Image (cartoon, coloured by chain):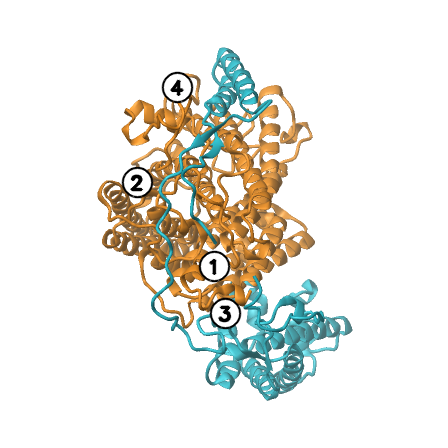
Amino acid sequence: MPVEGNPDNPIEAPAPTPWPMLMALGLTLVFAGLVTNVAVTLVGGVLFISGAVGWFGEVLPVEHREPLRVEAAPAAIVPATIGVDYLHVGELGNRAILPLEIYSYSAGIKGGIAGGIAMAGLAVLQSVVVHHSLWYTANVLAATVLANLANASTATLSSFIPEAFVVALIIHASASILVGLLYGVMLPMFPRYPAFWAAIVAPLLWTGLLWSSLSVINPVLDARIEWRWFILCQIAFGAVAGFVVNQTERVTTMQHLPFAVRTGIEAPGLGGDREGQN
Amino acid sequence: MAGTIDREMGLDAVDDLEQLPILGRLHEWVITVDHKRLGLMYITGGLFFFLVAGLQAATIRLQLAVPNSGIVPPQVFNRLLTMHGTAMVFLVGMPILTGLFNYLVPLMIGARDLAFPRLNAFGFWLWFFGALLLYFSYIGGDGLYGAGSAPDVGWFAYAPLTELPFSRGNSTDYWILSILLTTVGSTATAANIVSSVFCMRCEGMTLTKMPVLVWLATVVSFMILVALPPLSAAQVMLLLDRFLGAHFFDTQAGGSAVLWQHFFWIFGHPEVYILVIPAFAFASEIIPVFSRKVIFGYSVMVAASCAIGFISMSVWAHHMFSVGMTPAGNSFFAASSMLVGVPTGIKIFNWLGTMWRGKLRFKVPMLFSIAFLFQFLVAGLTGIMLAVAPFDWQLTDTYFVVAHFHYVLVGAIVFMIFAAIYYWFPKATGRMLSERLGRWHFWLFVIGFHLTFDTEHFAGMQGMPRRIYTYQPGRGLETLNFVASIGALVQGIAVLIFVINVVRSLRSGEPAGDDPWDAWTLEWSTTSPPPEYNFATLPVVRSRRPLWDLKHPDDPDWRYE
């Protein structure tokens, strides 16, 4: 990256000019005249046109440029005298491109499905124990989007409603898979005790957030939720999803490799040492 | 400015600007087309209006410090509120960020200037005269000599309330005309930056080797090109309504009562990102240098910024939940608003990833950047809360919203503007800002910021409406408002220290040298301040950190990119 200059060879730059300023002033006066006096607009119009003509003269037929004398070059950048010793992660010295290993996305999806099943099992158990119905919890979940269920009686919510069951299934399945994916991505980021983060901390944080905001967002739904069971369900999901993800073998990230290699393009020299390339 | 200029007389008769009389020096600044000077003019102008709008904010907080206060009458309060909001967005945020991009982008891409230097000057002067026109309304709003008549319609100027029957006099016209001028100026600058980035990069600087700041400047410029024209169109429509009797927003003649809101927020929401993405850009340059690490996830950072720019165009109606849209409309805008949180969250993770296990240097720019990370996270979380339509219905138009957007505009943007000024001041002036005064500025500003805006969240949840000039005692708002006003005072003291620091350092600051932070991007390879031509020989780069390659020839970046 050479930056040295040649003092004998001046550099040309666009010449300073007042015309853009005059044109802007003219346009402003044109506008200002609308709220003051038409004479202001007229003066502005004259300035605007003068500025435009002057500006055109600056660039047509040939742009007006002026030479600048080259000054003393900046001090040369010298190589650092001390070695690079900032980080010792991986093979790349100071460039710690982390994480070095991750779980595959499929592990997250599997974890999400397993966690979702465990959570659904507990939710049905709660429904049976507390409300003597298989369907109560599913119907409450569906009520988050089905407005007609939001104010339904406990008896209605305890009955089987096909539409509500389908909606609850879709919500539960998609949320479980997405959260499972999140677990798959995030678990390698936690340096220690991933099971603790997955099974305890994350569910408690998520529950706390919902608990503190649901009374404002949806008070009717808030009144229907038994929070102790809710926490149990969340912990069950976190523990099972975390366990499944954690059992999966990690794969080395490919982020150190060139894009062409990652996409599988076969060409000579792509994967080798690029030191020789300029 | 270090560049020495020959004009008409040949190279042997060089004018040294420092030796010119003051009028001559002023003339040189007025006629300049140099991107660095124009950048500094934008920044200086923006900082001037920051002080003016800050004083207006202080007066607002003084009025609200105690209940039933009569320091300013209601209409004056409305004018203060309008001018504070308008100035902070159009005369402070936009010009300072534009100015920093103006100054930095050509240097960072190894170019001698922007693609259209004269257009750049035109853009600046349009902004400058537009700003003067807005403040001229204090003398001209009720007629040429009707004193004290600035606009009182809020920075959003909702039509039809801004139609002639409800907003007499010319104050609203001043607002429309001045903002029209400043937005034309911003559009010119955006076109200039896009052209420069795509056509004037130095040899070797492919798109994937551009500094993150340059990428983000490009994203913001595209956003300006898309988002500002709807505002200008709406303003022209309102002018037609007011001057020529058109009926765009006149409901009695078949116009629409919410059309203005749609137009305004189609501009207004991307505008938030137009302001905050430059803050991301500064963080992405400052955090790696002070962490002594490459930025974590360069490509993801860039992709996330592009995604933010794209998604932010489709979220405007979350400002309009209380208008009464259809459930489908509410759901779409709630979902798209929450979606913005995903790329934004990615960026926060990436900054944290950059800092993680780095050798952190807690200089003032880094302190401001760390505070930005925390505050922007909170701003994002309250933003997600407000994206939930039922939550928004209950808290819209309360101080919770005021606190939320000040967390974005001050907690993120102003903090990163300060970080950027501390970081690049040595490059622009050749002198360092005082670290000691900088720390006083930082800590007082942090304390003042949190005293003011943390408490405003609670005032909002207690039911304090926004835009009211006073409130009754006995509603649990006294203490919160008093604490918020004390916070504003502390922020004011912090800004005063910053001004003293700048003035003092300009006169007698420690000489900076060319590369005081041991940084890696091209602007640090030239002198401080840079000569008018930027680089005597245009640089050739081989990686995203060209100065790293020079300083560490045994371990250059280009081996890994």
Q: Is residue B77 left or right of residue B122?
A: left
Query: Tag 3: residue type?
Result: Leu
Q: Indicate which disc residue B69 carries.
A: 2
Q: Chain of mark 2?
A: B
Image colour for chain A is cyan
Question: Is label 2 on the same chain as label 1?
Answer: yes
Question: Is label 2 on the same chain as label 4?
Answer: yes
Q: Chain of mark 3?
A: A
User: Label 2: few (<14), some or many (≥20) within 10 Å?
Assistant: some
Q: Position of residue B411 (x, y in %)?
A: 40, 53
Image colour for chain B is orange
Does any portion of residue A152 appear in the rendered image?
A: no
Q: Chain of mark 1?
A: B
Query: Tag 2: residue type?
Result: Ser
Q: Is B242 drawn above or below residue B406 in the view shown? A: above
Spatial separation of the CA atoms under disc 2 and disc 4: 26 Å
User: Label 3: few (<14), some or many (≥20) within 10 Å?
Assistant: few
Mark 1 or mark 4, which is nearer the start of the sequence?
4
Q: Nearer the viewer, residue A222 or A244?
A: A244
| Residue that carries the numbered disc 3 in the rendered image | A209
At mark 3, the secondary structure is helix
Does any portion of residue B142 appear in the rendered image?
A: yes
Residue that lies at the very extreme toward the top in this rendered image: A39
Question: Is label 4 on the same chain as label 1?
Answer: yes
- Which residue is drawn at the image coordinates 35% and 37% (left, top)? B2
Q: Nearer the viewer, residue A48 or B388?
A: A48
Question: Is label 1 on the same chain as label 3?
Answer: no
Query: Tag 1: residue type?
Result: Arg
At mark 4, the secondary structure is loop
